[in-house]
Amino acid sequence: MPPITPIYPTAFEVLIFCIISLRTKDEVAYPSADRLFTLGRTPMAIAKLSVEAIAQAIYPAGFYQRKASQIWAIAQDLASKGMEQPPADREALLTYTGVGLKTANLTLSRGFNIPAICVDIHVHRIANRLGFIQSNDPDESERLLREHIPQRYWSKINPILVYWGQHYCGAKAKCNLCPVRSDCPVG
């Protein structure tokens, strides 16, 4: 199983990594974030960089130029307020361009240790496939999961189901390899 503790130790780093990782494979996202974080790990340091320098650091992440602008704008905002970390509030995080519900919740969960359910494609697909919820929309899936799962499990759902989706229960399920196939309502 994957670690539940964050690879990047601060909420700011988690937020920036989440932005870089959107629509980008892990094999590209992690090295891209690492290159950026060698240039700076705080809002103040990132705000001093040019958008072009950020773009070069995170390339070849998908939509790297747009993400570079978003990262720079977030760093500028936080630095101008003297804040080392982003706000620990979902609604405040959602005001930043490029930050959606998934990114906000992952930042809260991994960056601040605040219970939140991060619904990505794996969580959405598996929760629906197993019949835990019925939803066509990831944001609705997040709401339904919050209503039905005890809060103490919220932050654990994403890493477990991401791992499961990457190895067994992806778009094309590998039921024949699944170690819990005998207990699965689908397999």
Image (tube, helix red, strand yellow):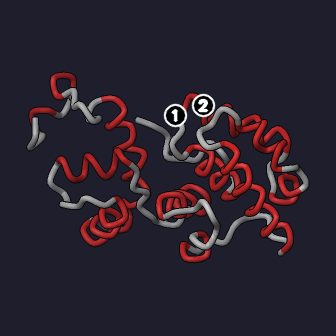
Q: Position of residue 60 (x, y in %)?
A: 66, 32
Q: Secondary structure at mark 2?
A: helix
Q: CA distance from mark 1 to mark 2?
A: 6 Å
Quadrant of the frame with the C terminus? top left
Q: Secondary structure at mark 1?
A: loop
Quadrant of the frame with the N terminus? top left
Which label sits on residue 103? none
Residue under the image location 81 percent in, 59 percent down: 43
Residue 87, located in which quarter of the rendered image? bottom right
Name the one closer to the observer, 63 or 9: 63
* Residue at numbered disc 2: 28
What's under tag 2, amino acid-wise?
Val
Residue under the image location 52 percent in, 63 percent down: 100
What's under tag 1, amino acid-wise?
Lys
Residue 65, located in which quarter of the rendered image? top right
Residue under the image location 58 percent in, 62 percent down: 99
Left or right relative to 177: residue 49: right
Q: Position of residue 20 (x, y in %)?
A: 62, 45
Q: Position of residue 51 (x, y in %)?
A: 81, 50
Q: Are marks 1 and 2 in contact (CB under 8 Å)?
A: yes
* Residue at numbered disc 1: 25
| Other residues around mark 1 within 10 Å, as few (<14) / some (14–19) / many (≥20) | few
